[in-house]
Amino acid sequence: MQDRMIARAKALLADGTVDRVMGWQKGEFAYDITPAVFRSPEALDRDFVFNDFAAANVSKYLVKESRKGGKILAFLKPCDSYSFAQLMKEHRVVRENVYIIGIPSWGKTDFEKIKDRGLSGIKEIKDNGADYFVATVYGDEVTVPKFEVMLDRCKDCKSKKIVVYDELLEEPNGEEVENHRFDEVAKLEAMTPDERFAFWRKELSRCIRCNACRNVCPACTCEKCVFDNRDSGVENKAAADSFEENLFHIIRAFHVAGRCTDCGECSRVCPQHIPLHLLNRKFIKDMNELYGDYQAGADPDTRPPMTDFRFDDCEPSVVYERGGAK
Amino acid sequence: MTYYKLPYEKLYDLLDRVAAGQKLYVPTDRDGEAVFAAYAPGTQLTKKLNTNRSAKDFFFPQTENLYDIKMKGKQLTVEDTREECEDFTVFGVRGCDARAFTILDKVFLSDPVDTYYKNRREHGTVVSLACNRPEETCFCRAFGIDAGDPEGDATAWRIGDELYLAARTEKGEAFIASVRDLLEQTDGAMIESLKKAVAYIMDRLPLGQTSFEGMKQTDLMTHFKNEKWAALSESCLGCGTCTFVCPTCQCYDIREFDTGKGVKKFRCWDSCMYSDFTLMAHGNSRNSQLERFRQRFMHKLVYFPDNNGGEFGCVGCGRCLAKCPIQTNIVKVEKALEVNGNAE
Amino acid sequence: MLNETLIPEIGVVTDIRRDTPDVKTFRVEAPEGGKVFEHIPGQCAMLSIPGAGEGMFSITSSPTQKDYMEFSIKKCGCLTSWLHQMEVGQQIGIRGPYGNGFPVDTDFAGKDLLFIAGGIGLAPLHSVINYCRDNRENYGKIDIVYGSRSMDDLVDYKEIIDEWCKEDGINVYLTIDREQEGWDGHVGFVPNYVKELGFDTNKTAVICGPPIMIKFTLAGLVELGFEKSNVYTTMELRMKCGVGKCGRCNIGDKYVCKDGPVFRCDQLTEMPDEY
């Protein structure tokens, strides 16, 4: 796939369709790869890499990149395309400044899961299709089935469909897929309020306020975040009161409600492994139940439930009824 | 140096003994993460090479109260809330984190001394633990750190079925003395062979040959003006992950918490990656992410060595390599800058 | 336990003067009277109010003033707004002194001095100017060029007219940015005025004002033939600790709070322009 991507990128650079390419740059080892902008065919040949560790949602970068002059080529995997469509709806990206090639994704890999198998000093990770061949400096040579080290978010994949694109690297386009992504939320809902409170207090107590979740989130595109305002009293670093971190995450979840496409970047980047996506999924599940099924970013046109009004919308009292029933 | 050993299975007897006398912290697994946590009989050491976050919290915690200040009418009262810290021991600090303490010392113990830091430092005993299996993200050797022979008040080595120990400072001697009856005196021959084994592995790790010395061939302004900063910082998200997992990042903010009955002045870790780090009422001296990104790496690789006899502000623990959401890191920065430096 | 530099002393505000519509000068003494600490011209102090924050301000009074310290402060943010609404008798947190200060007893000694200030930039120079006036025999001629947006924005106008202008060996040149009724002095920006005045290049110059004014004035002085090593300025960046540890006020490998705030312009040209 990497070769075909490079070939298309070079062709689109050569015919002037785009003047730069959003891609991935090689690093020192298999998973040490960084999103980067390429401006020449030589740079593409030298440094462009694409593999199962290219997990970041590049739509976030397109907010800024699409507002610069010229046109940029972006390879969007299905979940990136949902984020992009949602950003289009919010007028955060300039569609005509991005040339989108949709690329399929069969799930990205969590390198920490490879390391958690006791594999350290990794020298080489070879992609054999369904599994990896991992070799270490300690002489381990292990075959690891890909599914076992897949990112959690990819195991719960909601759709293989690319919802916005100029061309597809591979035909046909994927489909929405059956998933169990709300199972974990249902487990939380089944808890008593005290248990649930304890669960989140424990998870969120690990937060170090690095803001990686916010900064990577394609729904967090405010020009200036309220948490970057010094006068707010809740600015972006460690707080005097441990409750502040909890509020940060809850407020953020509220703010992206109805706009979060469930791309799972927040949990992927959390250095403390806090399952932040569960907060967002809870909102998505609630909205589905209260206002009918809705998937943010599934298309660029439909009105999101939180900014729409219908006479048959549920009454606010539903919140009390739902909470009070327990 | 005098070496001691005990059978590895007796390690927990040793830890029980230490913990009976004072607070003891060890790297252990909690919710799937390796963290430093208070030891209680039954606590198991993590099998992971290193903790998720660095060990700097022991001396420079993420938040700490500096003093209380209260205003009543026009009157102010300042209450010094400092208290003498109790003695504690941290066991199992890796060579990278152990070196980081000496780097933090250069900041906090230089005149004027930071008494909050000094208090903890004086009461803390660091028992480092040699690495047997360094990882692909490790590059401590670039800073002259021997993962097989880490510094600290005392050092522990796990070799086969035995744990070796040796003291390096007075505090380390006291640590050994407190468990002396569990130990048998021995020589350092096994340690020499472990050091060789670790060096052999280091040679074969992807970052084993990393060196930052080339950075010193170019002056500050050339590094600062290097046009590669633009590409290097282009995909940086501006989060504080690298800063907060870093064992040597020590920039802090001083803030206030209004309790309703007075104000607690506290300090907390800050990140030069954040947009408000240098924000003043009249403007900001580092407006773009490029400038902020450059500041972080210039600080570690140029400014800090300039002010501290050539010592870099990095220990090669590799946490930023593993934790950066987009895998940009100090090794990439070094490679980009040095290549440019040599070309000129 | 050892003294901790981050913990403030208490100071009492014993006098408040309004200098301009947005600048007030505050006199601060120790609760038992006298100065909270000694300083040298050009040094700064951290002033704090619980609930409003803490900030670095230059000490505008001269060390030769033995009874109190003064701070001329422009209202522009959260803390300074609070300071501006306080009344005499208010206690504040104060710690310091911080920074290197001006080399008044070494490099400045015996020299003709040229002070150039813009707006609130006079505040840090006020201390050194009065120090030189009080030790007149140690210095040559003193020239002062001071400009502001308008007549009303000239800080310490009364002192300048009543004292500085009347002293032998001191020449004061005032200017305002735009024509104004009741003003018969010079009109124009400071950097241009300095060039028009065309000073003798063996003087030691000290500039303070907004960054843009410093940049243009320095360029003007260099054009006149001044050596950068004879031109000093004093800087300000965001600070938290005041002792070179919190890590934010650096320009390259220099901390403004500790290695500055006073820098020679030849030093500045070898430093990154992050200020």
Image (tube, grey):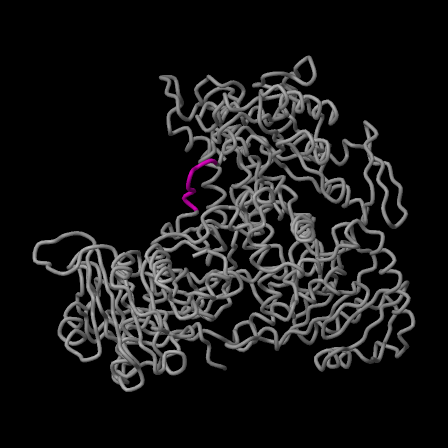
Query: Which one is nearer the viewer's eye here, A181 or A3?
Result: A3
In which quadrant is the N terminus of chain B drawn?
bottom right
Up the image or down, A213 lies above or below A97; here it is: below
Tell me: C53 left or right of A64.
left
Residue A210 in percent (x, y) is at 55, 49
Residue drawn 29% across and 80% down? C140
Q: In the image, is residue C272 part of the stretch drawn in magenta?
A: no
Q: Is residue B187 above or below residue C179?
A: below
Q: Magenta stretch?
A: A221-227
Quadrant assignment, res A306? top left
- Point out residue B306 in the picture as x, y percentages from the top left corner: 60, 66
In terms of depth relative to the viewer, which is nearer, B341 or C122?
B341
The kind of secondary structure the magenta stretch mainly shows is loop
Outermost residue toward the top in this view: A172
The vertical placement of A311 against C211, above or below, is above
Q: Is residue C33 visible?
A: no
Residue at 46% x, 66% y is C266
In the rendering, at what x and y percent does residue A240 appear?
46, 59
| Residue located at (42% from left, 63% from top) | C239
Q: Is residue B121 above or below residue A125?
A: below
